[in-house]
Amino acid sequence: MFITLTKHLQPAPLPVDDDPRWARIVARDKSADGVFWYSVATTGVYCRPSCPSRRANPANVQLHDTLQQAKATGFRPCRRCNPDGPSLEAANAAMVADACRRIEASEEE
């Protein structure tokens, strides 16, 4: 009796530093926010591409197409870039809009 073991090989992913998304992380490209996320094994966090944290070693980085994939790593969200919440620009815009509404609604100038 023979037992045949089969192994399903998946294509190896590109090394992170060869992936075009890595250049966007290095540049802290804000336009890439919401397009993809990345996680860092040594810190145990996942981040937005524009995260202001120190650049990670590409050998420790994994890229994710969706926020759910980043969460599935079991890592926590970064406290600097808050990848689960609104971007810093969106939060600032909401704060400015709220201030403008309060000024317009006030009885005194």
Image (cartoon, rainbow, N blue to C red):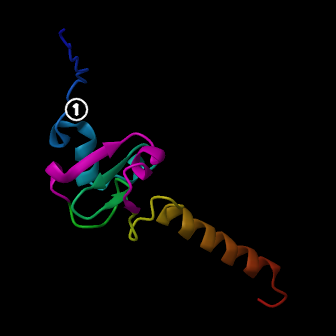
Residue drawn at the location 50% of the way across and 59% of the way down: 84
As helix, strand or loop, the secondary structure at mark 1 comes to loop
Residue 81, quarter of the rendered image? bottom left
Where on the picture, by quarter, is residue 63? top left
- Residue 11, how many percent across, how many down? 22, 24
Residue 3 image position (x, y, % from top left): 20, 14
Residue 93, position in %: x, y? 58, 66
The three-letter code of the residue at mark 1 reads: Pro
How many numbered discs? 1
Going 53% across and 61% down the picture, which residue do you hit?
Answer: 85
Residue pointed to by mark 1: 13
Residue projecting furthest to the front: 1
Vertical order, 10 against 104 (above or below): above
From this view, report whether residue 26 is shown above or below residue 81: above
Magenta stretch contains residue 109: no
In the image, residue 66 lies at what x, y percent?
A: 45, 42
Q: Which corner quadrant holds the N terminus?
A: top left
Q: Which image quarter holds the C terminus? A: bottom right
Give above or below for 93 relative to 62: below
Q: Most extreme residue toward the bottom, as rendered?
A: 108
Q: Residues within 10 Å of mark 1 (few under 14, many from 20)?
A: few
Return the residue found at the far top. 1
Report the magenta residues as a range: 56-76
Residue drawn 36% across the image and 59% down it: 75
